Image (spheres, rainbow, N blue to C red):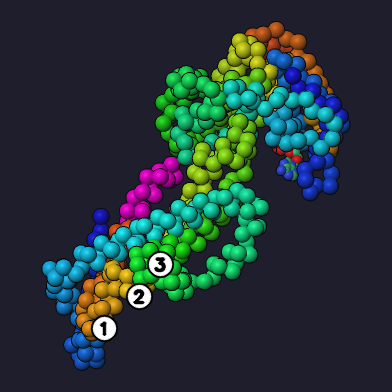
Amino acid sequence: MIRFQQLGLTFPGATRPVISGLDLTVAAGEFVALVGASGVGKSTLLRIVARLLAPSAGTADVPALGDGKRLPVAMVFQDARLLPWRTARDNVLFGMERLTIDPAEAARRADALLEVVGLSAHAEKWPRQLSGGQRQRVAIARALAVEPDVLLMDEPFGALDAITRETLQDELAQLHMQSGRTVLFVTHDIDEALYLADRVVLLAGSPASVSLDRSVALPRPRRREDPGLQALAAEIRARLHA
Amino acid sequence: MRLPWRPFLGLAIFLAIWEAVPDSGLLPSSLLPPPSAIPGAFWREVTGGQWLPALGHSLWHYLAGLLIGTVSGIAVGVAAGLSRGLDEGLSWVVRVLRPIPGLAWVPFAILWFGISSGAALFIIAIGVFWINLFATTAAVRAVDPDLIELANAFGRRDQWSKLWPVILPAAAPGILAGVRTGLGQAWMAVVAAELFGVPGIGQRMNQAASLIASEIVVVCMLTIAVLYGVMDMLFLVVQRRIMRWQA
Ligand SMILES: Nc1ncnc2c1ncn2[C@@H]1O[C@H](COP(=O)(O)OP(=O)(O)OP(=O)(O)O)[C@@H](O)[C@H]1O
Ligand SMILES: [Mg+2]
């Protein structure tokens, strides 16, 4: 599905690469959590998967661009990035407009997803009338609406309160089990990574590469109190602070 | 709501001074008519059948010239904002042509179109064109790159597919600021163009001046001021509707 070999990325005009010698393979249907310090290159890696950035070294096998019928990859950006001149509902429709989806079906999907993220009552509001967390949830609905093979999520729950976060984590876990979609999920919350992911990948170094790749072989659905999770968390924290 | 008494007071003082100047003999009333003479002069213009046709001609010049200049300015501005190549290619031509004031085109307007509405439209449109060209180019270039990236991420990879759903709405505040400037600029051009004999308020004003009918000149001036005020108000209503997503 996604394969990086000796991946390197240098921004134009920069002297040092941000990423260098990174090897990572993500199989179809896998849920991979990316963790790492701020500024290490997590968002940059997602941009390469979405073909928003081209690698400057190595090889990157990432999904092809859509053919008009489907969007193979959809992204939830770190900032919600809604179009301010569209209502919440019309923002959810944005991705689907490019695809050959029957408008009635698109509308049905948008309403269903707004329901999932708990925003049915706010569907007709402008982004400026929504809170930061509500905007983020619209962005999540917008990405899910195109039913991508690969879902890229860049700290999607960072701005949410604990209760909404746990609700959406559960929704995402369930969605992943049902759809078998590949998910690349950036987070700085190790407990969240372990609760959701099949694998936790730690990016570290400057330039960044994979410093730890730990599979989370715990059965689903998972429980937050699972002692197995606690043990893994301790292990990853130790590595993170090493 | 409190009454806005200061503007009223200011207006009253202004009118009082204006009324006093011809009375005091500082200026003969043929050179500066007192404001009290204006309503009567306005009524004579209307009943004499001068005012309405002049207004009609001027409005037609204004609206048609404005439309041509605005649409073409925005169209070229969008193209130049999107294409570095086009912008660079145009840059020297624009640098030469742009500083030429609209009025300097009058000789060519008359040569090409004769003393006709066509000449007036040309003079009006050309001034409005530059304003919209620059406002639009700048607004399109300033579109938030994050929104462009968002469009790319959701399958709108080429410029065309981004134009209507992302680029134009994002650039709308800047484009509309240009349109509004053009709205005012166009009235100046209307008067200037009509002073050369194309029928309209400007021509009527010129006739009145040569007859030393200064109160009619004032009627014409006020007509233009009111029309501009109405246009600007209409524009604000439309703008508020288009930009209702903004706070
Ligand atoms: N467009 C750009 N041009 C130049 N440098 C950039 C650009 N975008 C990011 N960088 C640099 O690349 C590095 C990685 O950035 P990136 O956004 O991928 O970090 P991150 O891991 O997502 O951090 P955070 O957790 O804070 O979001 C940073 O040092 C940043 O300064
Ligand atoms: Mg980031």
Q: Are marks 3 and 2 in contact (CB under 8 Å)?
A: no
Provide residue A144's location: percent of width, then percent of height.
Answer: 57, 22
Report the front residue among B113 and A178: B113
Quarter that holds the N terminus of chain B: bottom left
Q: Residue tagged by mark 1?
A: B210
Report the front residue among A242 and B175: B175
Provide residue B82's location: percent of width, then percent of height.
Answer: 60, 48
Element marked by disc 2? loop
Mark 3 to mark 1: distance in Å?
A: 25 Å
Q: Give the mark nearer the N terminus: 3 vs 2.
A: 3
Does mark 1's beta carbon lie closer than 8 Å to ligand 1? no
Q: Give the mark nearer the N terminus: 1 vs 2.
A: 2
Residue B31 sits inside the magenta stretch: no
Few, some or many C-alpha atoms within 10 Å of disc 3 (few <14, some 14-19, many ≥20)? Answer: some
Element marked by disc 1? helix
Which amino acid lies under the numbered mark 1 shown in the image of this protein?
Ser
Residue drawn at (59%, 45%) of the image: B144
Q: Are the residues flagged by discs 1 and 2 from a single subunit?
A: yes
How many numbered callouts? 3
Q: Quadrant of residue B88?
A: bottom right
Which amino acid lies under the numbered mark 3 shown in the image of this protein?
Phe
Q: Residue tagged by mark 3?
A: B113
Q: Residue tagged by mark 2?
A: B196
Residue drawn at (23%, 73%) of the image: B219
Residue B241 sits inside the magenta stretch: yes
Mark 3 to mark 2: distance in Å?
A: 13 Å
